[in-house]
Image: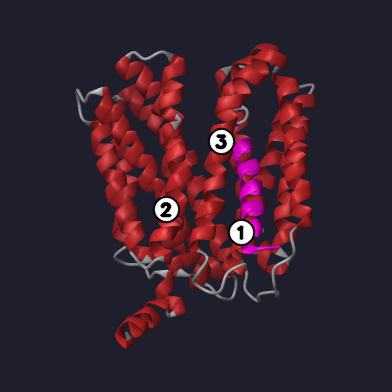
Amino acid sequence: MSRTALIASAVATSTLVGWSYAGYAPVAPLIAAELGLDDVQLGLIATALYVAAAIPMLVLGDVADRYPPKAVNLWGAVLVVLGTVGMALAPTYWVLLATRAVSGVGAGLGLLGGLRYVGLSYPEGRAHVGTGLFGGGFPLGSAIALWTAPPLAAATGWRTAFLITAAAMVPIVVLWLRVPEVPHFRRPGNMLDAARDGNCWWTFAQHAAGFGLVLAAGAWITIFLVREFGLALELGGILGSMLLVTAVLARPFGGYLVSRRILSTVGVMRLAQFVVLAGIVMLALPGRPLTVALLGAIGVGFGGAIPYAAVFNTAAASLPRSPAAAQGLTALGGLVSALIAAPVMGYAIQTWGFASAWLILGSISVVALVGTFAMRGEEHFTGSDRAARSARAAT
């Protein structure tokens, strides 16, 4: 099987996981009406997935170093499918919550296994485009969920919609069974090694200001557009989804910038935060027109997405004893940031207004920007920057 086919198969699994992130949100009102849920209970459905996804990242972050990455990704995909079926069949709220958590554990395992599989499919330091494509599958899956779940649920009911979605996921699992395993050997390190490594904490911060920041912004962007500009909810949702669509394209683009040596890994991270901050300024400006706000949202989505490959490949290079553990700690940064920032933004909006909420996100970006002047990029560990300079000198 060609490398292109391998990466396409990996992207299919990340798209599957991405659907699990957002699949419930469009049909949440239907779930609430049937089960008699309040807003707090609905909010816990989202929280259950993210908290559960954090468990393998925190406790089993090195699982893809101890077991074949293909198998880890397979376990993740299977759990997402089972969790989706479980949500469709759940008789009570608590069972629904538990099945959502099953999907969350699967999402965490799928990320860890898929990242290592893609990374090991390339020579050292060359996995950036593949990693970016794999990362782009997550927002693609979420966007597909936001676009398809409402009409599907309206036509068949939300339970049948989940069953249909689970059935559509099965061919992806079967496809993944057919891909070959990549060369793999057990690494001696673990999550404690990642926790002791300062550079891993900087990649944690970068992903917090990337995926986490975009996820928190995405939780409020539709409400922002509806309240600030009087848009219809449907139109606000479509325009707000640009955050996800932008990420689908920006993650591979960031990988391309590094793979073509246009920018270093740290250079991409630094550029990303400047773009995010510019976007936040446009969103927070008082009296800004809708066009400026939309450009700001695109800026936040683009800036939060382009460093994906640079961040995760830098994390892996930072800890050769356990690259998966380093990537697990990094991934945890995105979830922690989203879980904290989204409710804090809600409090800020309620108390001071939207401008203050956007500035809170800006503070996360500033920390990450400062970090780019303190951390070391992948090239520092792999020597690829020195090799590139030598090659240019030889020509």
Q: What's under tag 1, amino acid-wise? A: Thr
Quote the CA–CA distance across marks 2 and 3. 19 Å
What secondary structure prevails in the magenta region?
helix
Other-residue count near label 1 (Cα within 10 Å), few / some / many at <14 / 14–19 / ≥20: few
The reply, left or right, for residue 90 in relation to residue 343 is right
Residue 253's disc is 2
Q: From the image, state whether disc 2 or disc 1 is nearer to you.
A: 1
In depth, the one of 113 and 366 nearer the eye is 113
Other-residue count near label 3 (Cα within 10 Å), few / some / many at <14 / 14–19 / ≥20: many
Please report the bounds of the magenta region as a residue range. 1-22
State the image coordinates of residue 14 (x, y, percent, origin top left). 62, 47
Q: Which residue is mark 3?
A: 142
Q: From the image, state whether disc 2 or disc 3 is nearer to you.
A: 2
Q: Quadrant of residue 119?
A: bottom right
State the image coordinates of residue 344 (x, y, percent, origin top left). 40, 34
Residue 4's disc is 1
Question: Helix, strand or loop at disc 2?
Answer: helix
Quote the CA–CA distance across marks 1 and 3. 23 Å
Quote the CA–CA distance across marks 2 and 1. 17 Å
The reply, left or right, for residue 331 in relation to residue 224 is right
**Relative to 200, residue 35 above or below:** above
The reply, left or right, for residue 340 in relation to residue 144 is left
**Which residue is at a point 49% across and 48% down the rendered structure image?**
334
State the image coordinates of residue 380 (x, y, percent, origin top left). 40, 76
Q: From the image, state whether disc 1 or disc 3 is nearer to you.
A: 1
State whether residue 31 appears in this view. Answer: no
Q: What's under tag 3, amino acid-wise? A: Ser
Q: Quadrant of the N terminus?
A: bottom right
